Image: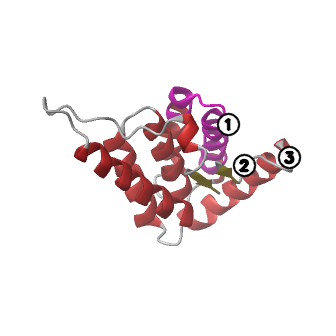
Amino acid sequence: MIRSGSTGAFGANSLVLGTAFLAFAFVACAGSTPVRAVRAARYYAAGTRALDRGESRAAIDALELAVGLMPNASEIHNHLGLAYWSEGRSEAALRELERAVELDCENEAARVNLARLRAGMGAAHRGAGFDGEERSARPLRDTVEGSVVHGG
């Protein structure tokens, strides 16, 4: 099951509170202006909602904007990595998840997702056909729900 700190038992209210908290955390940690942090938090929330709905293209669009505003936010890089992974863009996902862990080595969600992506990519390389075509490490909805962790 996908674990997400954005929705669940508390629904949209926890998303609003989480977004507000995230905006304040961005300002405190990154030394950003409050306006940039709020805009980044809004894009992050929109991207997370799109990711939860399985709309990876919309998630990528929103999360790329969030990363542009807050490039040092590990949580945003984690979610962007998941969105890329959902699109079948394993190399881009790997880059984002590695960046998330680099920024915050205690981001358990990013660490778990990175390990699972690497394991999937290894399996894809081992499963390459004779023509050398690599099979995607794209997380399928059926298997993703048991393995991907959104985090914050």
Q: Amino acid at mark 3?
A: Asn
Q: Main secondary structure of the magenta part?
A: helix
Is there a contact, CB below 8 Å, between mark 3 and mark 2? no
The magenta stretch spans which residues?
36-60
Of residue 74 and residue 98, the one placed in the foreground of this image is 98
User: Is label 3 in a helix, a strand or a loop?
Assistant: helix
Is there a contact, CB below 8 Å, between mark 2 and mark 1? yes
Of residue 90 and residue 122, the one placed in the foreground of this image is 122
Q: Amino acid at mark 2?
A: Ser
**Could one spot residue 147 in this view of the protein?**
yes
Of residue 87 and residue 12, the one placed in the foreground of this image is 87
Q: Earlier in the sequence, mark 3 or mark 2?
A: 2
Residue 54 within the magenta-colored segment of the rendering: yes
Q: Which residue is mark 3?
A: 13
- The mark found on residue 151 in the picture is none
Mark-to-mark CA distance, 3 and 2: 9 Å
Residue at the image point whose x is 62% and y is 66% from the top? 28
Q: Which residue is mark 1?
A: 49
User: Is label 2 in a helix, a strand or a loop?
Assistant: loop
Q: Position of residue 131 (x, y in %)?
A: 13, 29
Q: Amino acid at mark 1?
A: Arg
Q: Earlier in the sequence, mark 2 or mark 1?
A: 2
From what the image shows, is residue 67 above or below residue 56? below
From what the image shows, is residue 93 above or below residue 24? above
Mark 1, residues whose alpha carbon is within 10 Å: few (<14), some, or many (≥20)?
Answer: many
Residue 45 within the magenta-colored segment of the rendering: yes
Q: Quadrant of residue 23?
A: bottom right
- The mark found on residue 6 in the picture is 2
Q: Is residue 90 left or right of residue 133?
A: right
Residue at the image point whose x is 22% and y is 38% from the top? 128
Q: Position of residue 115 (x, y in %)?
A: 42, 60
